[in-house]
């Protein structure tokens, strides 16, 4: 650090280089000094990433942070909710970071703020020792600034593949309902995510499987086809055994009466 006059003047505070997206921006805010400046170099962060900030403010109980930039109110907004414009003298409209006994403070800014989406562009983070907005800052206020450039996040897609084999081979393959070829089959440049693989072959039951493709990797579908029913010919079914119903034997009424009379006659002779 290049220290000139400890009571007045400007301090230049170098940025400490940390791994990407994990760097800490060191902001020094000394109560009672006219200004604390950061070198005019913007930090670039993709929208949606976090940006840890830390610094020192000896003699202060808290530091207050606000944000200015493209399409934001000139006086600034609350970093963690850009729908809240800062109001000088109203601490709740600022992001607040407490200062510990050693005079140090920390704050993590999640750049995909609540209350709306920030545009890609360069913004300025203000750190002040009192809840004072941009338009009300004066020479007697201690504050520090750091420019931050937010970029649109980029998405790199690494396609994967699917290998499909069947026993027997020669089956038609549909991926997400679209014909893709016959087995054995290897598909390249398949996008990451979930896909439906359907296998069809005449005379066999169709097979449907859900496959998850991971970028740069190859998913495999292996299946043994099961013979199905030939269209138009009913499947053979076991014979149905009908329940046995007792057969009733009919006797003529006259024969029945004669038999009873003979039985009674025989009983009398005994």
Image: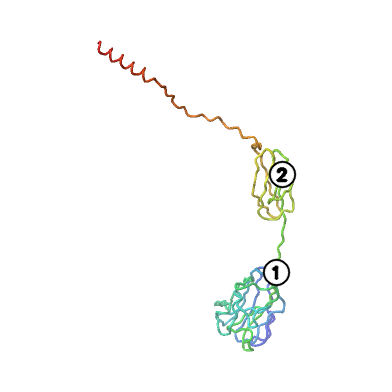
Question: Mark number for residue 183?
Answer: none
Question: What is the number of callouts on the image?
Answer: 2
Q: Is residue 38 left or right of residue 244?
A: right
Q: Position of residue 101 (x, y in %)?
A: 54, 77
Mark 1 nearby-residue class (10 Å; few <14, some 14–19, many ≥20): few
Nearer to me, 156 or 249 = 249
Quarter that holds the C terminus: top left
Question: Mark number for residue 172?
Answer: 2
Q: Relative to 252, say whether 221 is above or below.
A: below
Work out which residue is located at the far bottom of the displayed protein and give it: 139
Which structural element holds mark 2?
strand
Which structural element holds mark 1?
loop
Q: How far, Cα to Cα, is label 1 from label 2?
A: 42 Å
Q: Position of residue 239 (x, y in %)?
A: 55, 29
Of badges 1 and 2, nearer the viewer stands 2
Q: Are marks 1 and 2 in contact (CB under 8 Å)?
A: no
Which corner quadrant of the image does residue 11 belong to? Answer: bottom right
Nearer to me, 44 or 258 = 258
Nearer to me, 215 or 252 = 252
Quarter that holds the N terminus: bottom right
Residue picked out by circle 1: 152
What residue is drawn where x is 64% and y is 49%? 210
Specify how the rendered protein is coloured. Answer: rainbow
Q: Position of residue 62 (x, y in %)?
A: 56, 79
Which corner quadrant of the image does residue 147 belong to? Answer: bottom right
- The mark that comes first in sequence, 1 or 2, is 1
Q: Position of residue 47 (x, y in %)?
A: 67, 69
Mark 2 nearby-residue class (10 Å; few <14, some 14–19, many ≥20): some
Q: Relative to 32, say whether 25 is above or below.
A: above
């Amino acid at each position: 650090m290049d220290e000139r006059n400890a009571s007045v003047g400007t301090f230049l505070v170098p940025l400490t280089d940390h791994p990407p997206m994990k760097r800490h921006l060191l902001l020094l805010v000394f109560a009672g000094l006219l200004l604390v400046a950061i070198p005019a170099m913007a930090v670039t962060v993709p929208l949606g990433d976090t940006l840890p900030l830390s610094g020192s403010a000896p003699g202060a109980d808290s530091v207050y942070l606000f944000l200015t930039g493209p399409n934001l109110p000139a006086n600034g907004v609350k970093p963690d909710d850009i729908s809240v414009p800062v109001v000088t003298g109203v601490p709740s409209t600022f992001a607040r970071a407490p200062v510990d006994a050693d005079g140090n403070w920390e704050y993590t800014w999640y750049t995909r703020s609540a209350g709306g989406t920030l545009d890609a562009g360069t913004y300025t983070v203000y750190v002040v020792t009192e809840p004072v907005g941009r338009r009300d800052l004066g020479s007697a206020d201690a504050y520090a600034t750091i420019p931050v450039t937010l970029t649109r996040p980029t998405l790199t897609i690494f396609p994967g593949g699917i290998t499909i084999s069947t026993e027997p081979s020669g089956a038609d393959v549909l991926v997400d309902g679209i014909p893709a070829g016959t087995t054995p089959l290897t598909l390249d440049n398949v996008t990451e995510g979930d896909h439906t693989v359907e296998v069809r072959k005449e005379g066999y039951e169709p097979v449907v499987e859900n496959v998850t493709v991971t970028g740069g990797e190859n998913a495999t579908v292996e299946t043994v086809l099961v013979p199905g029913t030939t269209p138009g010919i009913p499947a053979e079914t076991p014979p149905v055994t009908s329940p046995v119903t007792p057969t009733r034997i009919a006797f003529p009424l006259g024969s029945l009466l004669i038999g009873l009379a003979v039985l009674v006659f025989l009983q009398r002779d005994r």
